[in-house]
Amino acid sequence: MLSVDCLAAELPTEEDFLSDMPVVLSGTRLYQSLHESPAAITVLDREMIEASGAREIWELLRLVPGFQVGSESGHTHTITHHGLSDQFSRRMQVLVDGRSAYNTAIGGVEWTDLPLAIDDIERIEVIRGPNAATHGPNAFFGVISIITRHPSVVPKHTVRVNKGNNGITDVLYRFGHSGERLDYRLTLNRLADDGFETRHDSKTVRMANLAADYQLNLRDRLEVQLGYSEGPRQEGFRDDLLQERNTVDKHNHFQQIHWRRVTTSEDEWSLQFSHNYEKRSEIRNGALFVPFDAGGTPERYDLELYRTQRHTPALRSVWGLGARRDEFTSKAFLGTTDTFTNNTYRLFGNLEWRIAPALLMNLGALWEDTEISGTTLSPRLALNYRLSPTQTLRTAVSQAYRTPVFFEQDADLRIEPAPPLPPFIPPGTQLQLFTGSGDLDPERIRSVELGYVGEFPRAGLALDLRVYRDSLDDLITEMALPPAPPPNTIPPTRTFINEQEASVTGVEAQLQWRPVPRSLVMLGYAWADVDSASTDLVDSTPRHTLSLLGSYRFSERFNGSAVWYYVDDQQWLGTGDPIPAYDRIDLRLAYTFRLGGKTAELSGVVQNLFDDYRDFRYDPEDTQRNNLFERQAYLSLRLEL
């Protein structure tokens, strides 16, 4: 039997993860350096998270090359890789400690409602490109894998308060305990702000998160996580006949239990079960229709078993299987109070073979069978060639699929016109706005890429380059059906069909540089070109995006940072006029001091310094429907006791 010291010596250390060229897990579920990964990965660590000045998790993804971040409202956000997205961003997989946060009802991720505080994140590993072979069918454009802080590394008591303009009032309290066999942390968090300047979209979110790690014996450990969030938020526009102002209540909770058996650092069994639950309560008001309940309840149960093994010095593998059940109940979106279900079964694996000292192969695949779209196979082959100990070339080819969500497949959204009705419309008539086709195929992406990873230790420099071409088929899009005979002619029913195709050619560059001690420069740049018969798809992708973060510790007490973002003009799908190209600059200055013998930090953040930033645009006939993000500033006080 291995000793605890032996196991600790073989497991990756914190230093491994926080070095300039960190060890990552998301590429294949095997611990690999970026030189060995079959995918291009951006790692956002604690230093970058704090330097960004972000209050919420979704804001951090602006730092990733080729990513676009938008906000449909002050509490509804979307994140995509090289465009091609509406407000729901259905083509990105988001994981929190291995648990999928994807909403299978309408797609995307409810970022505001994640029961997770930004203070509890250790790092975020972002895979830029398809990775279905490892993480399933929604790992279509990329994967955002959030890894939280282990309870043993957080202070016993942490208190943080944010206060600023635009109604910013945030409060956090976290308790951490580390024992011989049991470590746990409990975080309580409240976020509140007034949203966009021209919108009725303020929010208040209250959340709790518990993470516990119990060492059963020398080989077995049990990890448990629980999370809950709830709170009201405002929706609608001022003086809008279709979307009058109203209040929405949301509840979100999850449970996750994870058993690990570690024989050596490269021989491990893992069994995980998770449950996600969301509930939206909303009475939709409008002067042109009778108020109706626009709520819904998506729910997910997920069970997964996998094993990692070292077979020979040159051969490692990971393989696994899983089962998932998705449920959605919504009278508004599905036209019935019945619960719709989708059962999914999957097998996956990855083989890492060191063919020669300088040549590494990763061969992976996912087989999945789902009730909605049948059976799919998502393979990936990557070859990494080590030019030198610090420089690697990578080439990879892959195929991935995206399963339609419930609303695309089974929509039945109706409204009842408000009286007085025209004489040709009988009382009680319902007009159908959306209907599901019931027989959608999954979307498919085939990707080819060439990558370069280089370290230049004497210059304090790390460089990641990626050139890719993605070919997309059977893209799901909205289509207006021919008007029905009178009297039900307005509005026409819309449905979803597999209609569009596109190809995306792009270049991404990521640079991390420490020119002098106590400094960090992080540059992300992306160029993308979309070829498609659909002008909407072409316009949805900005040609150039850029982010530049710089931070410097002036002394043991003072540190400062600045971030510059640039995004070319783009048009989010279904939102009217394009958004012109914009710049945005955020600044942060922090002072660390001792208070009663304990560590304290006072920081000030200014976001959108020059007050020149737009998010979504809506109806092209109404230019007042821009999401205007005014300059925002807040002070933050954090105490560690």
Image: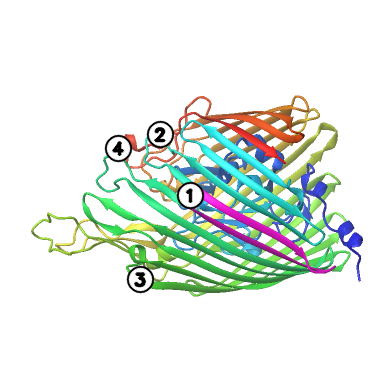
Give the structural element (helix, strand or loop) at label 1.
loop
Q: Nearer the viewer, mark 1 or mark 4?
A: 4
How far separated are the C-alphas under marks 3 and 2? 37 Å
Q: Is 267 covered by the magenta stretch?
A: no
Q: Residue at x 72, y 41 (%)?
A: 641
Cα–Cα gap, marks 1 and 4 = 23 Å
> Could you tell me if residue 123 is visible in this image?
no
Q: Could you tell me what secondary structure mostly forms the magenta stretch?
A: strand
Queried whether the magenta region covers residue 206, the answer comes back as: yes
Residue corresponding to mark 4: 622
For disc 4, the neighbor class at 10 Å (few under 14, some 14 to 19, many from 20) is few
Q: Where are the magenta residues, as a range?
A: 205-230
Identify the residue position indicated by label 3 in the image. Answer: 337
Q: Are dots 2 and 4 in contact, CB under 8 Å?
A: no
Q: Secondary structure at mark 3?
A: strand
Q: Which residue is mark 1?
A: 84
Contact, CB < 8 Å: mark 3 with mark 2? no
Q: Which residue is mark 2?
A: 197
Task: Indicate the amino acid at tag 2.
Answer: Glu
Position above or below: 134 against 322? above
Residue 565 % position (x, y): 57, 33
